[in-house]
Amino acid sequence: MRYIVADLLMRPTGASRFVDLAEPFELSDASATLVAPVSGRLRFVRDHAGVLVQGHVSTQVEMECARCLAPTTVAVDFELVEHFRPTIQLPEGPPILTDPDEEDEPATEIDAHHVLDLSAVIEQNMLLNIPLHPLCRTDCRGLCPICGHDQNEGRCGCEAPTDPRWDTLRAMLASPNGAGETNR
């Protein structure tokens, strides 16, 4: 996801161009795998301090369901708004003014060959927009905590273990005069 922006840096502030994304991509996070190319339409706008990139990006990732561990596909959509600044100025281009409020971040630098690399920024935004607890479906019943059976496929027959701290109360409820009766 590398784009040469020398032509845009030579143009006046406000000049823009559109870029269509439709590229395969690989995430560094092992818990998610992309199953669709990263797609979207981005607008590159020349501003006083570099290039502003904005647009909608979408893809699909495969992850494990947080309840039953089955593979599930999740849509990831986000709005990308990021400012990239050049590291050197073109001799024939308009001056590039630095913004004192902008932090120096290597992921948002346009390199010495005037190449703008979106890879790190796209990955950061994807990881921020992937759900923390993806579900294969909203009513997923998960795994049995005793035997590990997938309860979406039916009941396993296991009974939940009883908590021994409640034994005294169970005994009171089971006694003939214990269930909710009070002594007067």
Image: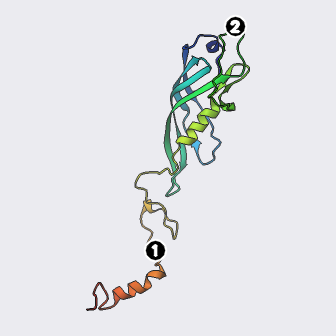
- Specify the color scheme: rainbow
Query: Measured along the vertical axis of the image, is residue 80 above or below residue 18?
Result: below
Q: Please tell me in which quadrant of the rendered image residue 38 appears.
A: top right
Q: Amino acid at mark 1?
A: Ala
Labels 2 and 1: the sequence-earlier one: 2
Q: Quadrant of the C terminus?
A: bottom left
Identity of the residue drawn at 55% across and 26% down? 21
> Percent x, y for residue 175?
33, 90
Say few, some or many: other residues with alpha carbon within 10 Å of mark 1 (under 14 / 14 to 19 / 20 or more).
few
Q: Quadrant of the N terminus?
A: top right
- Residue 34 in view (yes/no): no
Q: Amino acid at mark 2?
A: Glu
> Percent x, y for residue 115?
68, 21
CA gap between label 2 and label 1 equals 75 Å
> Percent x, y for residue 85?
65, 23
Identify the element where label 1 is drawn. loop
Identity of the residue drawn at 49% across and 57% down? 67
Q: Which residue is mark 1?
A: 160
Q: Nearer the viewer, residue 14 or 123?
A: 14
Query: Measured along the vertical axis of the image, is residue 57 above or below residue 166?
Result: above
Residue 84 image label: none
Q: Please tell me in which quadrant of the rendered image residue 111 appears.
A: top right
Q: Which residue is mark 2?
A: 92
- Residue 155 in view (yes/no): yes
